[in-house]
């Protein structure tokens, strides 16, 4: 485990994190996911206008983990009570430092505690290798429409015991 990872604090989402989480999401999609999706797709996926109140409500209803380094949110992920792993994003400057793995571990531990047997997730082309390494099985590739753009993503699942 790197020294960097040990300095990361993982905690539950608070409503006052909303603006930082939205900014991280938008910037990550528009930079990291840009390697696999067009500019038009990334702007549709992470538009200029994202309603904070809707995100805050959703993230509070889900089990949401944020990762912080020196008080700055550098990643987040969430799962709902059905076992749907909704988001997993790490700031572009903090990629490949174990942050996504730390968030995923906490999400999976929560699912086990809640008695969830199968975690499902729709992952981007960018995230598919990460989820594969973490033991998620590919169910199918799909084309989904969002904000006028069509995206390729993958339905995956992980059976947990």
Image (spheres, grey):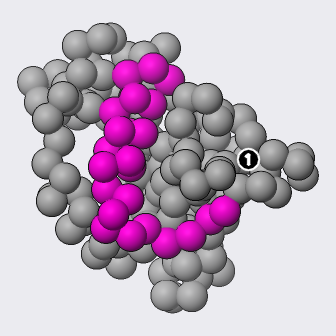
Check the picture and name the quadrant holding the C terminus.
bottom right
115 is higher (above) or lower (below) than 17: below
Residue at 23% from the left image edge and 13% from the top image edge: 40
Q: In terms of secondary structure, what is the magenta stretch mainly?
A: helix
Magenta-drawn stretch contains 5: no
Q: Quadrant of residue 124?
A: top left
Q: Is residue 143 something that shows in the picture?
A: no
Q: Locate residue 102, reporting x and y percent.
A: 68, 58
Q: Locate residue 88, reporting x and y percent.
A: 48, 49
Q: Residue furthest front?
A: 70
Residue at 52% from the left image edge and 50% from the top image edge: 73
Foreground of the two, 56 or 33: 56
Q: Is residue 50 something that shows in the picture?
A: yes
97 sits left or right of 74 in the view: right
| Residue numbers of the magenta segment | 9-32
Residue at 38% from the left image edge and 47% from the top image edge: 20
């Amino acid at each position: 485990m790197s020294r960097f990872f040990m300095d990361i604090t993982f905690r539950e989402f608070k409503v006052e994190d909303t603006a930082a989480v939205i900014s991280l999401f938008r910037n990550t999609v528009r930079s990291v996911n840009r390697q696999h999706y067009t500019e038009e797709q990334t702007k549709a996926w992470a538009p200029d206008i994202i309603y904070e109140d809707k995100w805050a409500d959703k993230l509070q209803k889900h089990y949401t983990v944020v990762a912080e380094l020196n008080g700055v949110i550098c990643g987040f992920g969430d799962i709902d009570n059905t076992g749907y792993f909704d988001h997993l994003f790490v700031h572009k400057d903090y990629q490949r430092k174990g942050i996504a793995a730390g968030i995923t571990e906490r999400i999976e531990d929560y699912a086990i505690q809640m008695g969830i047997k199968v975690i499902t997730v729709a992952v981007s082309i960018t995230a598919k290798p990460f989820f594969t390494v973490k033991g998620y099985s590919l169910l199918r590739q799909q084309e989904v429409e969002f904000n006028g753009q069509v995206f390729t993503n993958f339905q995956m699942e992980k059976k947990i015991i």
